[in-house]
Amino acid sequence: MAESVAHQHVARAGATGRRRRVFKDGKGWLFVGPFLAVFALTFLAPIGYAIYLSLYRNQAFFGGTVFVGLDNYTQALQDPKFWEAFARVAVFLVVQVPVMLVLALLAALAIDSARLHAAGFFRIVIFLPYAVPGVVAVLMWGYIYGDNFGLAANLNDLLGTTAIQPLSSSWMLPSIANIVTWEFVGYNMLIFYSALRTVPGELYEAAAIDGAGTFRTILAVKLPALRGAIVIATIFSIIGSFQLFNEPNILRTLAPNVITTYYTPNMYAYNLSFAGQQFNYSATIAIVMGVITAVIAYVVQLRGSREAL
Amino acid sequence: MSALTSPLRPKRSKLLTGVMVLYLLYTIVPLAWLLLSTTKTQDDLLSTPGLWFGKSFAFFSNIKDTLTYNDGIFLRWLGNTVLYVVVGAGGATLLATAAGYGLAKYKFAGRRAVFAVLLGAVAVPGTALAVPTFLMFSNLGLTNTVWAIIIPSLVSPFGLYLMWVYATDAVPGELLEAARIDGAGEVRVFFTVALRLLAPGIVTTLLFAMVSTWNNYFLPLIMLSKPNLYPLTVGLTQWSNQATGVGARPIYNLVVTGSLLTIVPLVVAFLLLQRFWQSGLSAGSVK
């Protein structure tokens, strides 16, 4: 009942495998081994190393490190900078993710509806920003936002005001949210669209025979078919929000007074390491964020698949 | 093709198309701004309206300047990016394909454990690992080498997931068995029989691995301090940062033109390979 989407995939893949005769021997390791070796080096070893680091602290005056147990964690949980950063990405998550996913959902439904002229053209163009490197997207929007030669400045000139200040402190978070939305609506749209394409035609016929109109069909047929895709997209978006780094870090050069070194948890961890040389504490922040993210992603997965049954 | 979705072939709606055009504009306007900006000199950039041409048409001289500025460092960054993408994304695709195939077509002790570990690890934010990875690589003497970028790029859990789902259905067990009866070894069966059947899945995995490697910013930012090893993303931000601080030497026109040159290869790849990745992606989501 609480089986996760991914676990359903596992179960299904396993079942198909059994039907198709899977060979019971160790030769599978031949194929899985190389991946696992690199995976161990780049995923498992750093996690282990981070946990190790988080249990020690540098002795600034005496040199060397000492074991401090969970002291770093206690410090992190009482660190107002960490919580400020966390609250910021939490607000970002609660506002930006729904906006982005609803836009993506509407676009996917519109493109799939057969009521749109040139649907294929819309699909590919709306997807295009995903192929724009995130860094380029931020540089581009950063210039557009700017006072020097941006569209924001043009717009202000046109309206004869100075009201539009995308890089000021009260506008900054929505400005970042706009960049992320611009980048990822198309990608999520494509995930939803791919899922919609797999709805069997008979379901639509049945709905039509039952006299269901467009909106009834969306509610009764299309949205249930999208549930798995929505859960996956939500989880990816949550992970993405909590990891927010590129956008604020690049915009920081344009607005150094607005974006602090601890604007997001990830920026905090980065700056602790590379500006402050506090590697142990930085690893602790990274682990705390990792655990919070994993727990929330897991809860979403659990709830998402429970509602489906 | 959308008409296939609904057997009733509803009328096309002007209203719906109009609403979608508004969204399309939101998608396109920034890109149009970028394209127009690449035709301007730095003076024009600062003094003429963003969504129209400037006084002079400097597109070609901008491209020439971008490619030659600072002894052609941009070309060096482009070469680095291509190296990281070819070795990193290519290797990631190979590893994910083999592993996905192995998980789908062999039953062996520890297979369940592999799933569990992978699912758990994917939930851990990738960037949370970056700092520990840096410290570890630094101890191993790998920072400031191309390996610092290539090794972490070799793992694509999403690619593995895609290939595993894809291989489950695309490679019939009977075919593998037939090849084995003919006396082919396991590795040979994989390369001669399975690879061909997996092609659409492989293209999709490769394309998405390419995007993530091409776009990689955080990892090279922390791993590399030598500009001649930078990929385009880190190089461009360095050019952009040149505009502020002490001794500022803004080169906005080069940043804008370099940005355009960075976008073009991926957009072309996506447009040319559309048929493959769209079918590969829906195969992945069917499951």
Image (cartoon, coloured by chain):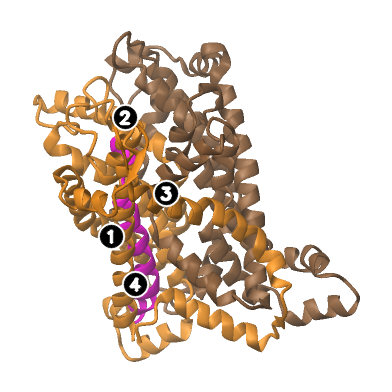
Chain colours: A orange, B brown
Instruction: Please give the chain letter of the residue carrying mark 3.
Output: B
* B256 sits left or right of A219 in the view: right
Who comes first in sequence, dot 1 or dot 4? 1
Inspect this view and state whether residue B251 appears. Answer: yes
Q: Position of residue B19 (x, y in %)?
A: 28, 55
Q: In 3D space, how far apart are the residues under numbered discs 2 and 3 (Cα atoms)?
A: 18 Å
Q: Bounds of the magenta span?
A: A220-248
Dominant SS in magenta: helix
Q: Which residue is mark 2?
A: A275
- Type of amino acid at the residue the image marks with label 4: Gln
Q: Residue at position x 30%, y 70% from top?
A: A300
- Type of amino acid at the residue the image marks with label 3: Leu
Q: Which of pointers 4 and 2 indicates the residue nearer the eye?
A: 2
Q: Which residue is mark 3?
A: B129
Discs 4 and 2 carry the same chain letter: yes
Q: Quadrant of residue A261?
A: top left
Inspect this view and state whether residue A181 appears. Answer: no
- Type of amino acid at the residue the image marks with label 1: Ile
Q: Secondary structure at mark 4?
A: helix
Q: Which residue is mark 1?
A: A292
Q: In 3D space, how far apart are the residues under numbered discs 2 and 1 (Cα atoms)?
A: 25 Å
Q: Which of pointers 2 and 1 indicates the residue nearer the eye?
A: 2
Q: In 3D space, how far apart are the residues under numbered discs 1 and 3 (Cα atoms)?
A: 14 Å
- Type of amino acid at the residue the image marks with label 2: Ala
Q: Which of pointers 1 and 4 indicates the residue nearer the eye?
A: 1
* Badge 3: residue crowd in 10 Å (few <14, some 14–19, many ≥20): many
Taking the magenta stretch, the answer to whether it contains residue A224 is: yes
Q: Which residue is mark 4?
A: A301
Discs 1 and 3 carry the same chain letter: no
